[in-house]
Image (cartoon, helix red, strand yellow):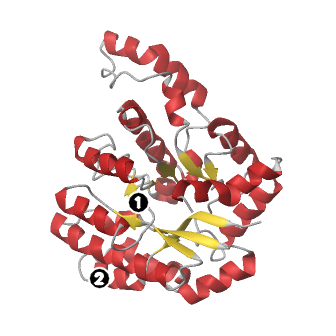
Amino acid sequence: MTVIDSYAHVFPMRLIEALEDVSPTAELRALRNQSSYLYDDTRRIAYMDEHGFDVQVLVLARPPVWLGMERADIHRLTRVANDSIAEFAGRHPQRFLGVGVIPVVDDVMMEEFERLHTELGLRGVLIFSNIEGRPLDDPSMWPLYERAAATGVPIWIHPQHANFYPWIGKDVLDRTLAWPFDTSLAMARLVYGGVFEKYPDIKFVTHHMGGMIPYFASRIDAFSRSTAKVYARLGIGESSGPQLTGPAIDHFRRFYNDSVSNGSAESLSLALRFFGSDHIMFGTDFPFGPEDGSWAVEELRNVRSIDVSDDDRERILHGNLEHLLGL
């Protein structure tokens, strides 16, 4: 059975070196030391062969490296990022599918969006769960959604650091809990901001199996039907976004989501019940985790062991990604 990893991370050395000249942060220094799989394609292919991964979708790692940069530097380095991802994928075109990145959205980055899916042949675009602290339904983001819907280019979403509390980095809570929370907020702003309402065929891919959404679906549904309006009337909540066609919770089911559950069959089963087997795609977060990539093996074992039909397992392991990209 074919195995396509829809959310495997990459960070080519060319980009690491370019970023070091502009913004030599601790996040960037960690990339050199965490795993050579991020930039060593030969070693990565050997790992894939050993553990049974046929294809990886390459998504740029560690979004915090982009924080605090001047816009002109972001423009220049985004081109380096997309060039280097395309080069990395191009060395093994039968094994890798590249996804470009747009850290911010403006006129220059919209030109880059056109370049990455035409000239560079990248199969999607990565954005972050907040854009320099702004939500994903911010007016600056809508030109991207318009073009992504028109071209059919899927948008991958990766969580980004946000301003929660100064102590949130202790014990890695910024990534353990805050990232799934920020992903959930991003999804909610896309729903309540009316992005699916205006562009019903737009395609988004979330990380970490849709964050908190499958677990809090009933609460989201209950609040969306009445409580938000009541709170606004009482003066303790902001007014709602545009009127949605049908229940808000149905809009959440339009997201595609990777299967990253850190090996939890119960969590994956819950996500499958909420999103449906046609909106969950095998993903691993490779090469992160202990023992230099062991999460990927756990995720594959998890998908192979859960109680689903063979057809559903085929959809999760490769069929949904193939459909998403028109392969």
Task: Report how far apart the C-alphas of labels 1 and 2 lie in the structure.
Answer: 19 Å
Q: Residue at the spot x=33%, y=20% of the render?
A: 237
Q: Residue 141: give x, y in percent of width and height.
A: 28, 47
Can residue 29 be seen by looking at this rendering? no
* Residue 154, above or below 94: above
Q: Which mark is residue 97?
A: none
Q: Is residue 320 left or right of residue 183?
A: right
- Side (left or right) of 298 relative to 310: left
The amino acid sitting under disc 2 is: Ala
Q: Residues within 10 Å of mark 1 (few under 14, many from 20)?
A: many
Q: Is residue 61 visible?
A: yes
> What percent of the width, then of the height, locates residue 43?
60, 87
Label 2, residues with CA under 10 Å away: few <14, some 14-19, many ≥20? some
N-terminal-most mark, 1 or 2: 2
Q: Amino acid at mark 1?
A: Leu
Nearest to viewer (mark 1 / mark 2) = 1
Number of numbered callouts drawn: 2
Quadrant location, the N terminus: bottom right
**What is the x, y in percent for residue 311?**
78, 50
Q: Mark 1 touching mark 2, by CB under 8 A?
A: no
For disc 1, the marked residue is 126
Residue topped by disc 2 = 18
**Residue pictured at 33% horizontal, 47% vertical:** 145
Outermost residue to the bottom: 42
Q: Secondary structure at mark 1?
A: strand
User: Is residue 146 found left or right of 88 in the rendered image?
Assistant: left
Q: Residue at x 27, y 41 (%)?
A: 138
Q: Residue 270: image x %, image y %?
A: 70, 40
**Res 213 → quadrant:** top right
Residue 125 quadrant:
bottom left
Q: Secondary structure at mark 2?
A: helix
* Front-lying residue, 323 or 25: 323
